[in-house]
Amino acid sequence: MLPLHSNSLARRPFASPLPLPPASLPSPRETHIWYVVPDELKDASLLYQYMELLSPCERQSVLRMNGERLQKGALLARALVRTTLARYTDGRLSPKSFKFQKNRFGKPEVEWDKYDLWAPPPLQFNISHTSTMIACGVTLDLPIGIDIEEKQRKTSNNILSLAHRYFSPVEVAYLKTLADPECRQSEFIRLWTLKEAYVKALGRGFSGTPFKDFTIRLEASNSKQVTGELKSDAPSIVVEAVDDPGILMNRWQFALFELNNSHYTAVCMERDVKNPADGENNSLKLEVWRTLPFVEDECVTETDAVKNIIR
Amino acid sequence: MAAVSATSIRFGSTFRTASWSSNQTGGRISNVKLVSMGISKRILPSLRSPHFHICCAAKPETVEKVCEVVKKQLALKDEIVLTPDSKFSALGADSLDTVEIVMGLEEQFGITVEEDNSQNITTIQEAADLIEKLVQQKAEA
């Protein structure tokens, strides 16, 4: 077990971490995603550097996790959030200086200080992790939810039992059309990540927005939505209330893709109505970086690390 | 004198912790509500202490069975020590794990957990308490 005791950390000398390269702010329809692969972290002294970034409360939370692996994951998650947000402040805020609060539903958000001569960017973020990856999504002033699941994830219970219990009738019917068990398994996981991303974007989480109350599905191309706008050719991911089918909740847009060849990733973002697209494709745009904070950043947006994107 | 454990802690905090990653308040119990056991609020000591146990707290065998289901679902290695106070969030359970644990417990004990009941369990002990309550209700029905 790593000796991650707060007391010893305060006195331990280490080289100052390299400054984080600044990042350009997300544009109105963009989600930026930064992800960490915990297994890539081989240098234990990095963990001490990350621990230094955390608030005392966060450190206690990390140490309360049961076992070294979970502690490391929790630590990396907090370090990822703090370092990611700091990148967008043009060097003015250090990762350590961020404060967080919860909205009335319990969703973490940044608590910004007031500055005389500078307005901090209104960043919104959301985080998701598995034991093998942690991802942080960032937008400019738009609610966002992100969920990742390992592609290989197997459920203990039967897929249709789970679906009958927790998914909407339309979604259950869809899963039933898939005869191949592996296909059904992966579609279940993908649908789960989409639903998770949606409730996280809403800010109420799983307990605040029962999965059974809404359907997420593909909407065929060339159909008119409630707003009367013609959609682009490709089918798109839409969400509708079970009680109100046919009325698509246009406010929310989605992306579903594979990340690092290991994880299904779903992003849900509120549509930016202040900056409507002029006839061009207004689907969600993604920029993705693989990172090991203070060590390495790699933009992977146009690479094989981000593929099979559905919006 | 009867004492009541804080069994109505909103499940929100488990899912929230699991979904939102770690939270600022750490393990502090929040949003505690009284279980309606016909016990007046006035005579109860602070509900924020975890040391009060309901007079009909679950049997050790039930707690152990819950531990087994949880350990299996979360694929916990033997080095991980589970206690009745172990919080699901501290075991790395995400929302899918939690629903699978609930379904696994239903199968083990032959009960059905209503969604709003499942909102109230954040530890092994709370799960065991709820299970015994539901088993007893089923027997009485």
Image (spheres, rainbow, N blue to C red):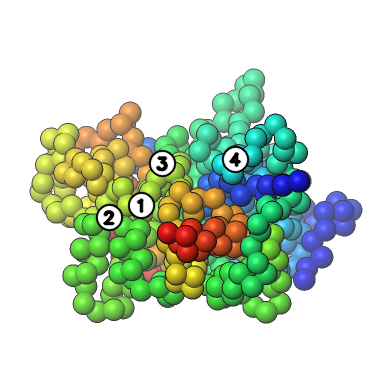
Residue at 68% x, 63% y is B84
- Asked if labels 1 and 2 touch by Cβ distance under 8 angstroms, the answer is yes
Q: Secondary structure at mark 1?
A: helix
Residue at 87% x, 53% y is A7
* Mark with earlier residue (3, 2): 2
**Compared to A11, does A305 lie above or below?**
below
- For disc 4, the marked residue is B38
Q: Secondary structure at mark 3?
A: helix
Q: CA distance from mark 2 to mark 1?
A: 7 Å
* Mark with earlier residue (2, 1): 2
Q: Are marks 1 and 3 on the same chain?
A: yes
**Compared to A110, does B5 lie above or below?**
below
Question: Around disc 2, counting alpha carbons within 10 Å, would you say few (fewer than 14), some (14 to 19), or many (20 or more)?
Answer: many
Most foreground residue, A167 or B135: B135
Q: CA distance from mark 3 to mark 2?
A: 18 Å
Q: Are marks 4 and 3 on the same chain?
A: no
- For disc 3, the marked residue is A202
- Asked if labels 2 and 3 touch by Cβ distance under 8 angstroms, the answer is no
In the rendered view, does A143 fall on the left or right side of A183? right
Q: CA distance from mark 4 to mark 3?
A: 36 Å
Q: Secondary structure at mark 4?
A: loop
Amino acid at circle 1: Phe
- For disc 1, the marked residue is A211
On the image, the x and y values in percent for residue A30 come to 38, 44
Whether residue A210 is visible to the viewer of this picture, yes or no, is yes
Q: CA distance from mark 4 to mark 1?
A: 33 Å
Residue at 83% x, 58% y is A5
Q: Secondary structure at mark 2?
A: loop
Amino acid at circle 2: Ser
Chain ID for label 4?
Answer: B
Amino acid at circle 3: Leu
- For disc 2, the marked residue is A168
